[in-house]
Image (tube, grey):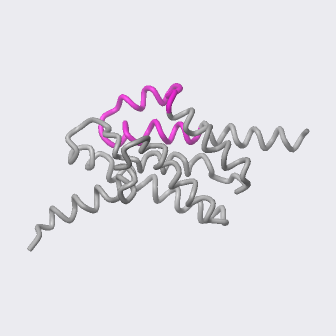
Amino acid sequence: MEKPETYKKLITLSLATVFGTGFIPIMPGTFGSLVAVGLFTAIRSNLTVLIVTAVSILTAFLVSGKAERIFKKNDPKQIVIDETAGQLTAYLFIPAQPIFIIMGFILFRMFDIFKIYPANIAEKRKGSLGIVGDDLIAGIYANLCLHLIILIKRFL
């Protein structure tokens, strides 16, 4: 009979890697973001997107630090739930139109890669805060850019 601790590790790793997405050998973070793109395009309600985003953020904070300890490595690339949560944050209250979906993906990935202040500070924190914090900031930056683009578009 398996030990309960083994099941806890399996659940933690399943969630942290977004059900194995983090084990894709090339650009696992990008694929973690693409999971969020798929979720966002499948959901048509702002309220549902908000709930799914909140649950993903909470889950990311709960499992990332534990998964980091299981991997025995600082912010391992296999943990991609932070990218999923950050990408979903980028889409909060954004129209599910192809142009905004594509721009949101590009903006989020750009902000996630370049770690603009305070994301560069957040990334240096240990545990879940360091793993998830920079992606949430990237998601917020991307979201603000998308809302600004929508606002400008209304006046043009």
Q: Relative to 13, is 113 above or below?
A: above
Query: Residue pushed farthest front?
Result: 26
Picture quadrant where residue 13 is located: bottom left
Q: 131 left or right of 7?
A: right
* Image quadrant where one finds the C terminus: top right
Q: Residue visible at 22% across and 58% down?
A: 9
Count of marks overlaid on the render:
0
Quarter placement of the N terminus: bottom left
Percent of width and height locating residue 126: 30, 35
Note whether 84 is above or below 76 in the view shown.
Answer: below
| Bounds of the magenta segment | 113-140
Q: Is residue 149 left or right of residue 46?
A: right
| Residue at the left extreme of this rendering | 1
Magenta highlight on residue 125: yes
Question: Is 143 one of the magenta-colored residues?
Answer: no
* Residue 26 place in picture, x, y as percent: 41, 42
The majority secondary structure of the magenta stretch comes to helix
Residue at image x 32%, y 38%? Answer: 75
- Can you give x and y, in whole percent of width and height, for residue 151 in the image? 80, 42
Residue sitting at the far bottom: 1
Q: Nearer the viewer, residue 42 or 59?
A: 42
Report which quarter residue 142 is drawn in.
top right
Determine whether 106 is above or below 97 in the image. above
Answer left or right for 50 relative to 7: right
**Residue at coordinates 70% horizontally, 42% vertically from top-left?**
146
Image location of residue 141, percent across then percent down: 60, 36
